[in-house]
Image (cartoon, rainbow, N blue to C red):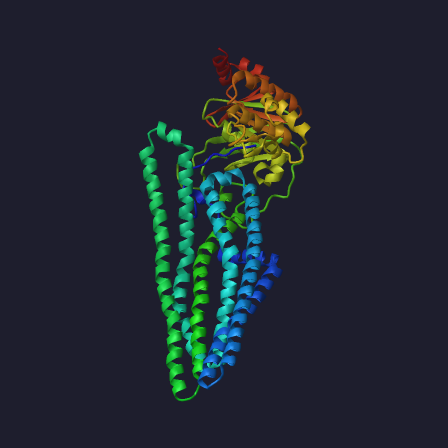
């Protein structure tokens, strides 16, 4: 029912005023990953068991090949070799089937888990206060919900089964070499010479990938803001400035990606060398031992084949370890959304606070009290301009069921006051309460039951007309939906070819600005809050339609508190009381007749508009 505007700015950890969405720390990220694993523990256990069996079956081939070599050297017959070859074939087939089924189980686990991640992300995003989203920037939220979630999905779907298979194979192969000959097993430990390169990489990779994700979010935010304000950019001749800012963001994004590429370019060659070392060691030591009659040639060949095979699972683990660094950073950003505040008590509440919880208090009644309110956009950012108040000591009481009109010149603070009354922002000083409870301290679900803000900004969601209306009241029947449309004068809805089942948006009916605004007003009727704040809510309607809609709404909202912020002063004429804002202060308050008779600021506005 409300709409929010995109605020240009940088995303990640460096937004002015600490307004960036938080990023989960490593411990929190690990706990979240473990919770996901525990929720599907049976699938994980089955996947590990199948991987172990597949790895065990894979050990048979090299061992039997060594037996074949020894059999041939000792003069064994062809039948013996054939039987051993058939066993190798059977073990290879068993390994193939077991590994395939293990990957199938792993992929199903990954898809179920990533579905939970996506659903949790959507729930958390929808629970965010509008001010948190506005100040953090929609680009950051979009990047986390798209590229970051996709990275997590790829890790869960592909990395988990692949790493499990590779880890089981590597463990069994190393164990088999040790069983063959302990001395050759010591040679196999040379594969761990690559650990030093891996440790060097891991110490740097997490931060580098977090920086890359933040740069991607900043670029997405800048592009989204530029696209949304394209007409303004063109009208004010800001093309060069926006192009320069975009090039700077692209360059920053390129530098962060080059950094992660450099880390990979050091890691991969170092580890490739580590794969060759144990094979060379086994051939040299094994050859010396065989020459002295210590071990058979078949044992040397088997050990060399085992260690040669070890390179494949280790390469897989390394590849996914590198990918998991990127996915881990992405998961930290996705999980960080759960640490964003669900309520606002002051602008400082936008700082990451993992323990932020909704206030359990419920309003005692519908009375709204505004007491000594001061407010500044961007308070706490350190900028002198941002800390300058736009509201100065506003005091106002809105009685239950009252119709209050807020008027004043542009820039007087009317819309800012409306945002505070709707709980979108919290005052810098003073308080805004409903029934004795701070409006901004209510959790979003309780807030929507108390107060609804409708602005001239609006949004039509892809889906049917019914879907768009049931956002406000999921259980509403067709009769209630049609009544809400009729209440706001949306006669056009009855003429749609499929009625409430008509698709809206691309490929269906495209509502114009006035129809979209009527949809937003119909949602308010369906939501049925006790207080409705209309911030130029009929601005896109022509004067005659706007007047008709306002009168229809007045009839439907009888008994509800209505606060109308308007430039069309006939709204003020019909209100119980009129509040006049000037330069961020409430200068006049009274009925229309009393204020006209007082011959003050409202009277001047009335005479100017009426004439």
Q: Position of residue 381 (x, y in %)?
A: 42, 42
- Residue 587 placed where, x, y %? 51, 23
Residue drawn where x is 51% and y is 52% of the image = 153
Q: Is residue 377 above or below residue 103?
A: above
The front one of 40 and 301 is 301
At horizontal 57% and vertical 56% (from top left) the residue drawn is 109
Q: Nearer the viewer, residue 30 or 224?
A: 224
Q: Residue at x 61, y 34 (%)?
A: 472
Q: Quadrant of residue 220?
A: top left
- Furthest toward the top, the residue is 611
Relative image position of residue 236 (x, y in whole percent): 35, 28
Residue at x 50%, y 61% (from the top left corner):
162
Q: How many numbered circles are shown?
A: 0
Left or right: 280, with 478 as reference point: left
- Whether residue 417 is visible: yes
The one of 524 and 570 positioned closer to us in this rendering? 524
Task: Measuring from the top left, give residue 55's x and y in whole percent.
Answer: 53, 69
Question: Is residue 24 visible to us here?
Answer: no
Q: Quadrant of the N terminus?
A: top right
Answer above or below: position of 5 versus 576. Answer: below
Name the outermost residue toward the front. 78
């Amino acid at each position: 029912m409300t709409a929010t505007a995109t605020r240009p700015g940088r995303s990640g950890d460096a937004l002015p005023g600490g307004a960036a969405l938080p990023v989960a720390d490593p411990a929190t990220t690990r706990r979240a990953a473990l919770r996901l694993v525990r929720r599907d523990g049976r699938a994980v256990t089955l996947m590990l068991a199948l991987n172990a069996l597949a790895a065990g079956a894979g050990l048979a081939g090299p061992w039997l090949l060594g037996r074949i070599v020894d059999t041939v050297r000792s003069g064994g017959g062809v039948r013996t070799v054939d039987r051993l070859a058939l066993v190798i074939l059977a073990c290879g087939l068993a390994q193939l089937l077991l590994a395939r089924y293990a990957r199938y189980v792993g992929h199903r686990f990954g898809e179920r888990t990533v579905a939970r991640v996506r659903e949790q992300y959507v729930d958390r995003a929808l629970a965010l206060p509008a001010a948190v989203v506005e100040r953090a920037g929609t680009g950051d939220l979009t990047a986390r919900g798209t590229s970051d979630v996709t990275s997590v999905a790829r890790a869960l779907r592909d990395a988990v089964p692949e790493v499990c298979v590779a880890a089981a194979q590597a463990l069994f192969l190393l164990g088999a070499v040790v069983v063959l000959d302990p001395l050759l097993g010591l040679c196999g430990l040379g594969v761990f010479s690559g650990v030093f390169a891996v440790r060097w990489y891991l110490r740097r990779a997490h931060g580098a990938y977090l920086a890359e994700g933040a740069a991607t979010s900043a670029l997405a935010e800048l592009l989204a803001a530029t696209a949304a304000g394209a007409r303004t950019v063109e009208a004010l001749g800001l093309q060069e400035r926006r192009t320069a800012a975009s090039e700077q963001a692209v360059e920053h994004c390129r530098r962060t990606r080059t950094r992660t590429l450099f880390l990979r370019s050091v890691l991969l060659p170092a580890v490739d060398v580590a794969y060759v070392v144990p094979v060379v060691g086994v051939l040299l030591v094994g050859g010396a031992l065989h020459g002295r009659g210590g071990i058979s040639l078949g044992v040397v060949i088997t050990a060399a084949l085992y260690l040669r095979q070890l390179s494949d699972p280790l390469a897989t683990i390394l590849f996914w370890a590198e990918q998991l660094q990127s996915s881990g950073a992405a998961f930290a950003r996705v999980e960080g959304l759960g640490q964003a505040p669900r309520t606002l008590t002051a602008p400082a509440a936008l700082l990451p606070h993992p323990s932020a919880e909704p206030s359990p208090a419920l309003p005692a009644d519908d009375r709204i009290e505004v007491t000594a309110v001061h407010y500044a956009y961007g308070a706490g950012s350190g900028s002198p301009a941002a800390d300058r108040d736009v509201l100065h000591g506003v005091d106002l009481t809105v009685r239950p069921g009252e119709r209050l009109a807020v008027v004043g010149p542009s820039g007087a603070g009317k819309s800012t006051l409306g945002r505070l009354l709707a709980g979108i922002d919290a005052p810098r000083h003073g308080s805004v309460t409903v029934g004795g409870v701070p409006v901004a301290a209510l959790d979003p679900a309780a807030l929507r039951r108390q107060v609804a803000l409708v602005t001239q900004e609006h949004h039509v969601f892809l889906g049917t007309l019914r879907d768009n209306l049931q956002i406000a009241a999921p259980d509403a029947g067709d009769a209630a939906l049609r009544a809400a449309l009729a209440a706001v004068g949306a006669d056009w809805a009855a003429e749609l070819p499929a009625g409430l089942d008509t698709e809206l948006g691309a490929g269906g009916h495209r509502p114009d600005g006035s129809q979209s605004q009527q949809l937003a007003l119909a949602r308010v009727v369906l939501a049925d809050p006790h207080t409705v704040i209309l911030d130029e809510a009929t601005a896109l309607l022509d004067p005659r339609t706007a007047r008709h809609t306002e009168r229809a709404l007045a009839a439907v909202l009888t008994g509800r508190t209505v606060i109308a912020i308007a430039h069309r002063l006939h709204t003020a004429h019909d209100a119980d009381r009129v509040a006049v804002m000037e330069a961020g202060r409430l200068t006049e308050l009274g009925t229309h007749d009393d204020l006209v008779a007082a011959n003050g600021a409202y009277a001047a506005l009335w005479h100017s508009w009426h004439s």
